[in-house]
Amino acid sequence: MKRPFQLVDVFHSGTASGNPLAVVFNADGLDGAQMLHITRWLNFSETCFLLKPTHANADYRVRIFTPESELPFAGHPTLGCCHAWLRNHSPRKSDAIIQECAAGLITIKRHETRLAFAAPPLQRSGPVMESQLIEIADFLRIPRAEIEAATWADNGPGWIALQLATAEAVKALKPAASHHTSLYIGVIGAYGAHASPAFEVRTFFTDQHLTVREDPVTGSLNAAVAQWFLTTGRATAPYVVAQGSCIGHDGRVYVHEENGAVWIGGHCSTLFAGDCEL
């Protein structure tokens, strides 16, 4: 049958500069194996499938897939799906859109000219074992001493977040092309005082072949890092993050606090739309 789809540019700073996302509508008739097959064929970092909600308060339900597996939550799919859904639907509430996903209910709001989601609770936080940090430093091809701080920052994918001294140090990273185990690593460094953007972020993860890939812009990692930085005083909100410049993108992530919650925002645009026969 024909199902509508959109290709959305998420966290962009200009045309085709963010993280691309495929959104397939009316996906209730597809099973998980079919969704994974479609995602692998498209080969984006994530593809989303919109379904009827099962929770009374949700506006829609989404299943999020990488070419390797299904994720309970991811940031750029959350904003991209919401943007795509809003092109043809109205939310139940006037001030928020409620997304249902495997991680639970996620609240999304319009903030200025952008969409923003409330950062979900971390599933794991706290110190990273020294042996792991030594292994990660070896993977990044930097001395262990260059990692100034580290924490588990897992809100679904399983991120470990690292802080380096500067944004320039982050941009200079040349990690190994493969790794012997699965990993999800996020690295952040600051630009000079009062600079905008304030930070540079890069994220690295392994695919099903243990080949290392770099994500253009990563909402889940930025959400977890924002919770870490704001709680520990490493940053004050609002602030802006740049990501993707090392792989030809120019993404922007906007972080602010509201009513005790951390919000992760960005610009979204639909670049292609049509019907797919699935």
Image: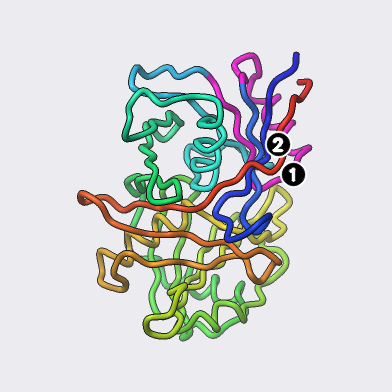
Q: Separation of disc 2 and disc 1 at Cα?
A: 6 Å
User: Which residue in the protein does label 1 denote?
Assistant: 43
Q: Amino acid at mark 2?
A: Thr
**Residue drawn at the location 76% of the way across and 20% of the way down:** 278
Where is residue 140? Give x, y as percent.
60, 74
Q: Is residue 227 left or right of residue 196?
A: left
**Residue 57 painted magenta:** no
Query: Which residue is rendered at x = 68% and y = 40% of the image?
Result: 7
The answer to which image quadrant residue 177 occupies is bottom right
46 shown above or below 11 = above
Q: Are marks 2 and 1 in contact (CB under 8 Å)?
A: yes
Secondary structure beneath label 1: loop
Region rendered in magenta: 26-51
The amino acid pointed to by label 1 is Asn
Q: Nearer the viewer, residue 90 or 277?
A: 90
Is residue 266 shown above or below 204? Answer: above
- Numbered marks: total: 2
Reading the image, the residue beneath label 2 is: 39
